[in-house]
Image: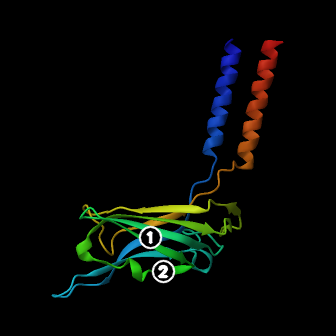
Amino acid sequence: MRRISLSFALMMVLLGLCDRAFADGVAIGTFSFDPVFAPTSQSPGLDSFDISDYTGGSSLPTIFPVATSLNFGNLDLVVTNADGTVTSYSEGSAGEGSTFFFDTLVYDTQTPLDATLNGTISPITIALSDGSTINIGGNFTAVLDPSLGSALTAGVDSTTIFASPQAVPEPSSLLLLCSGLALAGISLKRLLW
């Protein structure tokens, strides 16, 4: 009975290691809240939510390592304002480089508390700056929370947009899993026969 427990424990450890062998997200851009112009004595200031796609020719290999030019599509921005209202903007798509959306211009008086950007990514097979190729999920979500106080601050608050690799174990993980299962099978065979 002790051998069965040890074999089972070994198999659980190996499965746990396989789970940790999945790659982390890949940085593909930024989502920020930026000032457009400062207020005069007669008008409120105007701010904008901006998206920067740092892939392809706009990539920065150590920070944004995607060599393939990606397209962000089906962009949907949801903003929670201080007065309790929620505003939604459907943005269409954004290509490589910085994108400034004029229909997301907001007055300082709206005081956005947070913003969530959802979208799709294509293509889903991408090349990285190190020459490797990975498959990524076709969707992303980026949440912009205030870094100072309780509301977003124009020119201060930004976040990184990440693409999530598809949940496919690396070959070494598969080898580790198969080895663990084989060891467990051999141990069980010896105990039962």
User: Residue visible at 75% across and 31% down?
Assistant: 181
Q: Residues within 10 Å of mark 2 (few under 14, many from 20)?
A: some
- The image position of residue 52, as x and y in percent, is 49, 76
| Position of 12 relative to 41 (above/below) | above
Q: Quadrant of residue 123?
A: bottom right
Q: Which residue is mark 1?
A: 31
Task: Look at the image and tell me in which quarter the N terminus lies.
Answer: top right
- Give the residue type at disc 1: Phe
**Which of the pair 36/132 is nearer the observer?**
36
Left or right of residue 70: residue 177: right
User: Residue visible at 31% across and 62% down?
Assistant: 147
Q: Residues within 10 Å of mark 1 (few under 14, many from 20)?
A: many
Residue 96: which numbered mark, if any? Answer: none
Q: Which residue is mark 2?
A: 99
- The image position of residue 173, as x and y in percent, is 71, 44
Q: CA distance from mark 1 to mark 2?
A: 10 Å
Q: Extreme left residue here?
A: 41
Left or right of residue 137: residue 193: right
- Give the residue type at disc 2: Thr
Left or right of residue 63: residue 135: right
| Position of 66 relative to 84 (above/below) | below
Q: Quadrant of residue 34?
A: bottom left
Say how many tags the image has: 2
* First reached walking from the N terminus: tag 1 or tag 2: 1
| Position of 155 relative to 149 (above/below) | below
User: Residue visible at 81% across and 16% down?
Assistant: 190
Badge 2 marks a residue whose secondary structure is strand
User: Residue visible at 74% across and 43% down?
Assistant: 174
**Which of the pair 16/110 is nearer the observer?**
110
Task: Look at the image and tell me in which quarter the C terminus lies.
Answer: top right
- The image position of residue 90, as x and y in percent, is 46, 72
Badge 1 marks a residue whose secondary structure is strand
